[in-house]
Image (cartoon, coloured by chain):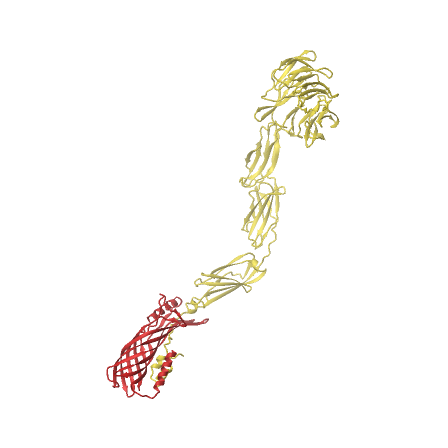
Chain colours: A red, B yellow
């Protein structure tokens, strides 16, 4: 999370510098997408089963789609763009139960910044009013998975959490369109991201792996469709 | 309030980018809650326990209680006494029990508090976490008393309907858990058996001692509690449960017994042991035990006891007659008997415990009217009595001397020491050792010599080497010795007369002065000597008709006081009879079964039967 904050602050600083060439483009924007999270959903079902042995808990959040943030810095060459990109996505799962006597929640919070390389292959000349292009990205996702348990009754205020980390490789591809307005531009993209997840490790102890009831390792899988819109400036 | 990203992004805001950057940490935060409407539970259970708020604790007691609703998942109870925790209980059905021991507490009034907790079972989260529990509390006063009770009073013991019954008062001590009725049976002051009955039913206040069979017994009620055992005060009881009487008629003797006082004791019976034979009778009715054919002089042991029918239980004799004799009347035991006609007295002698004992009995009453104890070493031959027929000369032997006896005063008036005369040989005593009216003594010695000695002068009138003993007639005129008859006198030589018995050797001579006949009784035959001259010359031997029954032994003796001869005969193995014959006509005067053997000798003197076992019979 701290890494993402630094990245975007750096981008803001760049935007505030004098522009020397329109071959350099910087953009920031938001995305919205679906997330596979197959392992974590399975794990959530296991948690639910355990909790339901005591109370009729339900899954209230099952890693829903949510807004993420991203930015890129690219260079043009002929009709193509090459550069780096960074982004941040989050989602969560929740199992909850409450009544007059108290409540219990078990949250699975996933936070994942990513960095990678970006390539866009244009179908028109650069700086046309409308630019259509194909996208191909790849990089690394830095996952943070936090299990957060809360129990509140008249007698008990119990809160406990544990955090795991893992690193994924991701690839995404799709297409997009850009509307150039002088030095500014607006960009819209449709992508599909595919992750190669790895097992979550306990924070501070890489030898401790999060396992499900079957004894298999559990990873964070961000695979899914992304819709993004961003705005930028050309230098 | 958490930051709502969706809300923020749904609006266009010129500072969007800026806000985005500032809130790069904006992440999905789940906030939905799954609220379930659950009905809240309220305390409605009831505690079922003693309504009495004061409990008594005298003995370890188990208390039980229950919670009326039994649908809870679990129940816990905590017990406190005077605020001090004692124990915890768990139950799955709301039923509890716990025990308190009074020895754990001091005497006095204590406060017992029960705290029962159980879950609400409302189904709420707190209920599922066992945090929603109800507590019911109840308090009691507990009176603790550890003081042991006083010894229980004496029970009452008596015979009712023929049963030995023991009654006692029920204890009022609440700490008593059981009675132990302790029974001791005594023989005198010695405890010979004991028993006890344990009962936990404190309402029982009586028992029948089925095994009581008479004699001394004690009963006591012991109280047992958890931490005490208090022995009661014993009550002693004693009774002779049956009357036994001995009857002795000629040819018919035995015992009669009454119905027992314990006729209701079905478990006991009368057992009579007679001469090793055991007879059993019911105690519910009177009865009789006839004892036939007890030999004269025999002492047959009898024992009466009431005993349990079970052999495993110790029985107690209540009546004993050690020995009885057939028609015999008890007198001192003796070995020798003589009669003094002038004093109408019998004289018995014996050697007992280092002394010659002589008893003088009145011949009419048979009472002992005088006695003499003469200590003397246990030399062979001490004790025999020998009197002359006219009682002019009377001796007993002690210190290997003939002690002269004053029959009137039972004083020793001198002695005759024959030891030098007979070369210190042992004196062989036989019944036909005879002492004549003129003080002549005929006897044999250990060196196989026979003597006739004048006891007045200690002169040897006649002697012969022969192991057989001579026998003198009471007048001292004739002697029978070794199949032959001798004629003699104080100053005359002893001459063998004609006639000699061919097959026998020893015998007793007796003479009938009134008929001037002389007989020699030898075993079962009597031989008569015919007079060859008048008045007193005998020589021709005639065997008279065999007058005496008998098989095998034994010697018969002549009693000149009653003019009879007598003796014991074996008629079968261990079966003896005592026969007395009239010496005038040889008719049998009497025949009675008799005990015969070592120191079991019958006598017949002056018309009275004697037995050395210490009996007489007229």
**Count of all numbered marks drawn on residues in the image:** 0
For the residue pair B541 and B295, the one nearer the viewer reads as: B541
| Residue A125 in the figure: left or right of residue A101 | left
Residue A8 position within the rendered picture, expressed as x and y whole percent measured from the top left: 36, 82
Residue drawn 28% across and 83% down? A76
User: Which x, y percent locates residue B90?
Assistant: 47, 61
Residue lying furthest left in this view? A124
Residue A124 percent across, percent down from the top left: 24, 83
Find residue B220 and report its horizontal and vertical position in percent. Answer: 59, 48
Q: Is residue B169 at all visible to an observer of this figure? A: no
What is the quadrant of the N terminus of chain B in the image?
bottom left
- Residue A147 sits in which quadrant? bottom left
Q: State whether residue B499 appears in this view.
A: yes
Residue nearer the viewer, B508 or B241: B508
In the image, residue B67 sits, relative to residue B606, either above or below, namely below
* Residue closest to the eye, B399 or B147: B399
State the image quarter where residue A222 is shown: bottom left
In the rendered view, would you say B376 is above or below B159? above
| Left or right: B312 as drawn, with respect to B8 | right
Q: Quadrant of the C terminus of chain B?
A: top right
Residue farthest top in this picture: B533
Q: Identify whether B69 is placed above or below B543.
A: below
In this view, the residue in front, B549 or A207, is A207
């Amino acid at each position: 999370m701290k890494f993402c904050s630094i990245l975007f602050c750096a981008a803001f600083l760049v935007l505030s510098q004098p522009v020397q060439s329109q071959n350099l483009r910087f953009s920031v924007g938001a995305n919205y997408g679906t997330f596979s999270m197959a392992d974590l959903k399975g794990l959530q079902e296991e948690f639910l089963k355990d909790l339901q042995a005591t109370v009729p808990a339900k899954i209230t959040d099952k890693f829903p789609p949510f807004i993420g943030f991203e930015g890129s810095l690219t260079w043009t060459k002929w009709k193509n763009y090459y550069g780096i990109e960074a982004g941040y996505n989050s989602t969560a799962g929740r199992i909850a139960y409450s009544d007059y006597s108290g409540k219990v929640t078990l949250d699975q919070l996933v936070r994942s910044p990513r960095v990678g390389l970006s390539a866009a292959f244009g179908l028109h000349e650069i700086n046309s009013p409308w630019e259509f292009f194909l996208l191909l990205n790849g990089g690394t996702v830095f996952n943070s998975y936090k299990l957060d348990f809360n129990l509140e009754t008249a007698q008990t205020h119990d809160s406990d959490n544990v955090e795991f980390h893992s690193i994924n490789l991701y690839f995404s591809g799709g297409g997009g369109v850009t509307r150039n307005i002088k030095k500014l531009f607006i960009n819209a993209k449709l992508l599909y991201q595919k992750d190669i997840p790895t097992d979550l490790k306990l924070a501070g102890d890489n030898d401790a792996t999060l396992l499900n009831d079957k004894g298999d390792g559990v990873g964070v899988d961000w695979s899914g469709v992304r819709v993004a819109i961003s705005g930028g400036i050309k230098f | 309030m958490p930051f709502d990203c969706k809300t923020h992004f749904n609006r266009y805001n010129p500072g969007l980018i800026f806000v985005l950057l500032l809130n790069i940490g904006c992440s999905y935060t789940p906030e939905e809650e799954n609220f379930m409407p659950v009905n809240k539970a309220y305390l409605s259970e009831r505690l079922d326990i003693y309504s009495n708020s004061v409990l008594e604790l005298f003995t370890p007691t188990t208390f039980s209680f229950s919670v009326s609703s039994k649908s809870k998942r679990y129940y816990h109870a905590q017990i406190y006494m005077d605020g001090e925790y004692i124990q915890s209980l768990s139950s799955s059905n709301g039923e509890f029990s716990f025990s308190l021991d009074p020895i754990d507490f001091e005497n006095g009034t204590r406060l017992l508090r029960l705290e029962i907790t159980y879950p609400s079972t409302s189904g709420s989260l707190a209920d599922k976490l066992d945090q929603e529990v109800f507590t019911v509390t109840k308090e009691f006063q507990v009176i603790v008393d550890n003081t042991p009770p006083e010894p229980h009073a004496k029970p009452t013991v008596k015979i009712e309907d023929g049963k030995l019954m023991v009654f006692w008062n029920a204890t009022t001590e609440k700490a008593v858990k059981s009675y132990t009725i302790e029974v001791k049976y005594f023989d005198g002051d010695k405890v010979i058996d004991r028993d006890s009955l344990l009962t936990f039913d404190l309402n029982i206040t009586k028992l029948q001692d089925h095994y009581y069979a008479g004699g001394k017994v004690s009963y006591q009620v012991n109280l047992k509690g958890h931490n005490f055992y208090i022995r009661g005060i014993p009550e002693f009881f004693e009774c002779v449960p049956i009357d036994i009487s001995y009857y002795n008629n000629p040819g018919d003797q035995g015992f009669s017994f009454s119905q027992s006082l314990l006729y209701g004791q079905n478990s006991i019976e009368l057992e009579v042991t007679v001469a090793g034979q055991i007879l059993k009778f019911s105690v519910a009715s009177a009865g009789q035990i006839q004892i036939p054919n007890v030999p004269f002089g025999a002492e047959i042991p009898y024992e009466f006891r009431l005993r349990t029918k079970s052999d495993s239980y110790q029985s107690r004799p209540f009546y004993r007659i050690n020995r009885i004799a057939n028609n015999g009347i008890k007198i001192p035991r003796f070995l020798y008997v003589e009669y003094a006609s002038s004093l109408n007295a019998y004289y018995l002698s014996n050697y007992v415990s280092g002394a010659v004992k002589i008893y003088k009995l009145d011949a009419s009453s048979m009472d002992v009217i005088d006695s003499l104890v003469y200590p003397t070493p246990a030399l062979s031959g001490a004790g025999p009595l020998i009197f002359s027929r006219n009682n002019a000369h009377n001796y007993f032997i002690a210190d290997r001397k003939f002690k002269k006896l004053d029959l009137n005063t039972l004083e020793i008036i001198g002695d005759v020491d024959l030891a030098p005369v007979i070369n210190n040989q042992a004196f062989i005593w036989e019944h036909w050792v005879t002492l004549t009216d003129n003080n002549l003594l005929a006897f044999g010695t250990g060196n196989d010599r026979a003597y006739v000695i004048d006891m007045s002068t200690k002169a040897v009138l006649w002697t012969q080497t022969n192991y057989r003993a001579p026998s003198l007639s009471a007048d001292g005129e004739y002697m029978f010795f070794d199949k032959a008859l001798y004629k003699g006198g104080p100053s005359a030589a002893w001459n063998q007369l004609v006639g000699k018995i061919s097959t026998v050797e020893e015998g007793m001579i007796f003479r009938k002065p009134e008929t001037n006949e002389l007989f020699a009784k030898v075993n079962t035959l009597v031989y008569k000597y015919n007079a060859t001259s008048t008045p007193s010359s005998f020589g021709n031997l005639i065997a008279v008709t065999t007058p005496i029954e008998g098989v095998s032994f034994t010697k018969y003796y002549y009693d000149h006081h009653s003019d009879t001869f007598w003796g014991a005969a074996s008629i079968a193995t261990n079966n003896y009879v005592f026969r007395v014959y009239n010496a005038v006509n040889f008719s049998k005067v009497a025949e009675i079964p008799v005990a015969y053997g070592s120191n079991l000798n019958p006598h017949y003197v002056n018309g009275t039967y004697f037995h050395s076992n210490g009996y007489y019979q007229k």
